[in-house]
Amino acid sequence: MWKLALRKPPCASSDKACQLLTTGGALRRFYHEDVAYGYRVPKKFEYPDYSLEQLKNRQQQAALVCLVGAYRSTGHRATDLDPLGLQKKQIIPELDPARYGLTDPDARYNIDGILAVPVRDKSGYSSAAEIHQALNDIYCGHVAFEFEHIPDTAEKRWLADYVESTSKESRPDSSRRRRFFELLVRSEAFDNFMQKKFGQVKRYGLEGAESAIVALDELFLLCNQSGITEAVLGMPHRGRLNILIDLLKYPPRALFHKLQGHAEFPESLPASGDVISHISNSPSLNYGYKENLNITMLHNPSHLEAVNPVVAGYGRAKQMYLFDNNTNPSCALGDRLIGIQIHGDAAFTGQGVIMETLGLSNLPHFSLGGTVHIIINNQIGYTTPATNARSTLYTSDIAKLVNAPIIHVNGDYPEEVARAMRIAFEYRRMFRKDVIVDLITFRRWGHNELDEPSFTQPQMYNIIRSRASVPKLYERRILGDNIITKEDAEQTHQSFTKHLEAELAAVKDYIPQADHLKGKWSGLVMSTEAITQIDTGVEREILQEVGRKSVLVDDTIKVHPRLVKHHIQPRLKRLEDGTTVDWATGESLAFGSLLKEGYNIRLCGQDVGRGTFSQRHAMFVCQETENVSVPLNNIDVTQGKLEVANSNLSELAVLGFEYGVSIQSPNILPIWEAQFGDFNNSAQVIIDTYISSGETKWLRQSGLVMLLPHGYDGAGPEHSSSRYERFLQMCNIPMDMSENDAVQNPNMHVAVPTTPAQIFHLLRRQMKRNYRKPLVVAGPKTLLRLSAANSSLDEMLPGTSFRPVIPDMLAKNSEAVTRVVFVAGKLYYDLAKAYASQDEGLRDKVAIVRVEELCPFPRRELLREIARFANAVEFVWCQEETMNAGAYAFICPRLQSILPKGAPLRYIGRGPLAAPVTGISSVFKTEQSQILHDVFANV
């Protein structure tokens, strides 16, 4: 079904919708998910169309309409935006009134419905000269606008009306102008102090772009004024320290303590820390209004823009928390929370995560209700000029992907910067969509303060070194306007420098405090040793209840008849007999039991509602209406909620988003499922810089689960391996496991479960421990429907738990076993089938042990199995992956260290290969057969 989805903005003069038709809109294909948990779209506003009188006037003044349209669409190309003057104002022929026959400057025109500037003449008419001057002032000054690319006509009209009608607003009052001055001076004083005291430190200062602090301060003020209580902020290294010290209340003594070589955390904590350009602070600010504005500044890695989807996910999770705990039914996306992202100009164009994150911005299960983006555009990327850095006119052009309006502003004019932020904020408040402020500035030094920029940009840096700083320019302006005196200016400079001196002196007594495990995290601890086995069983009656309800829908949903026959009825039968629970049912039982206990679950990824292999069906789509039902949300009235978030075709941004969800609250189980396991490699930056190391760097725990379908089934080089060897390589456990006191406290868990009961316990274990760790699951493909891989409900009852090792269940006489084969994953079932075809005498000599959890290394359980087969003389690690992939490199030194002295660990599997596996089916079958043969040969 196709439906016209209209975006309807409000009247310029009122927050209330005008309840009139809009001319905007576009056709979009979507499910009717509006009743599904987590389906959130921004509230829609309406904006009046032109009145009949206005339409008649536009027809009569067609030439003037064309001129005004030209300024709105191309005026930005004739603006004075470059503080260095390198980019000269262009002469745009379309902006010449004569082009449209408007040659008489004294001619008077009725501008009603054409131009929204205030009219001085009581008759409502303006002269051509007045109109031309107004258009130049609005669209060709130090602020420029791009919004004509927006397909929604009503949005464009609102923006034009708002920009034009507010163009003659009075300047900020004297108190705000003094505030701007103080912020600018403090930023400059901080950079000067750092250069004097820590001259060899790469601080990535804000010099040249100090007006970014004014931009943020104005935005924070507007948020506080409008009732927003939460702001989630992500930014890169450039200017981070200035903003932390000047605006976000980060204690200078804490920074200086770090710069003197100390840790940012108490020494008792097992954390490795991070560099100064990645630290953060999350203060509460108040600008004189009823409620505080709580700022959450997230940590960032050096990988530019990787923080963006994390900000979006964190903000979304916090917003859902506010919804779930808000009794006001009218609360909408963006009412209480705002996302703020600061970017660099070269990164905004160059990093694909920008496009991917923008692509999430208007999706119902990902939207924040609008993010304000600020590009600190210093017109260079490291040493690369714009001509080599992008193929577009502006660095901000990528945002046109989501039809975001773009406001360009010259950073030399702080008051214009504040005005740009007010327009951006008002647009976001009205439409709950992303908006871009392109803050055009410069970089006083090179990429860092130790870099020599004139090697590659001599002309640019001749100009920079000969000009006054942004704070000095602003000081001259407000001195000339008698806002401050010279004494005031000098006092501002000196007082902040003295403050920094005092903070530096206080370092000797400074003791850092930990900022983790507070608020929603206060009931948790930092793990000191891995907990792998904890009672995660559930009463049979509850399992059967949630199992039944996982496939029950009301009469308004007509389920596909094949699902009734092959999914719903078989599940109900399995639950009744309790002995043939398949994988999807085991997973559903984990979900349902956790939901019944009050936990929330967010299941996200491509096609997760149905499942890549059509196995899950966590949501049913009505065959008549396409309404969506999520049965597990109808267990009882006190349960938690399951959000089924079918994502767009992104891995990097979506996984970053889910990581952001995971660090916001420990009470939600966030699951990202890759369509195929190897798709995780598109998100490697998030895995490396956040998932594997976020806790040791920043003390931020994450309970994120990554479900990665894995298994060699002839699918070829891609879609076979989840590349879980890469996760194992990042795990931080000892190599030598021979010592009894070997402590394992891994940064993440990596498991290869082979039964539904195992995945049931793994998922529940994520929430039942008193700490959170990421879990990587090399999940099944063929095992989803393999009858041999079924479990019984007895394996999920109270007193049961996840088993890191499943002992051999085939050998009848342990004393006769001479070869012990260790294996992980679905290959076990191939080996078990081959085992059954061997002679009985040979079978007695081989034991097959399943290693279900690779990290932490299951030392105790493996030692128990090794001791069980006291007469074994051969120990084998068998895998279907190539020798340079899979678990072998990780397992070999650890398993070897606990084997009987002198007993080598033999490898059986595919040889080394550059690709995960061959794409030639005959070769694949030969290799697979050889593995099975070798396991039982020459025993």
Image (cartoon, rainbow, N blue to C red):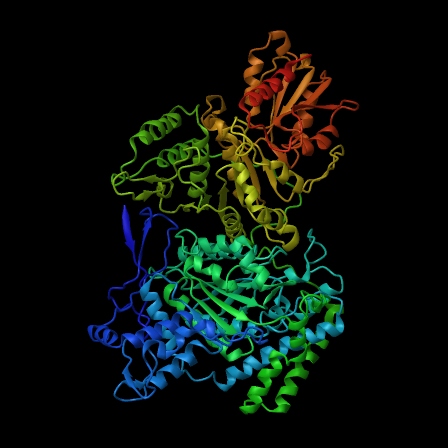
Which image quarter holds the N terminus? top left
Can residue 165 be seen at all in this image of the molecule? no
Specify whether 672 is left or right of 552.
Answer: right
Residue 823: where, in percent of width, then height? 62, 25
The single residue placed furthest to the left in the displayed view is 52
Residue 90 position (above or below residue 576): below
Specify whether 614 is left or right of 878.
Answer: left
Taking the spot 55% from the left edge, 45% from the top edge, the residue there is: 682
Can residue 564 be seen at all in this image of the molecule? yes
Residue 112 position (above or below residue 47): below
The single residue placed furthest to the right in the displayed view is 902
In front: 760, or 723?
723
Which image quarter holds the C terminus? top right
Residue 179: where, in percent of width, then height? 55, 81
In front: 152, or 417?
152
Residue 502: where, in percent of width, then height? 72, 76
In front: 366, or 741?
366
In front: 158, or 538?
158
Taking the spot 44% from the left edge, 62% from the top edge, the residue there is: 434
Taking the spot 43% from the left edge, 40% from the top edge, the residue there is: 608
Residue 607: where, in percent of width, then height? 42, 40
Question: Where, by quadrant of the figure, is residue 874 drawn?
Answer: top right
Taking the spot 45% from the left edge, 77% from the top edge, the residue there is: 140
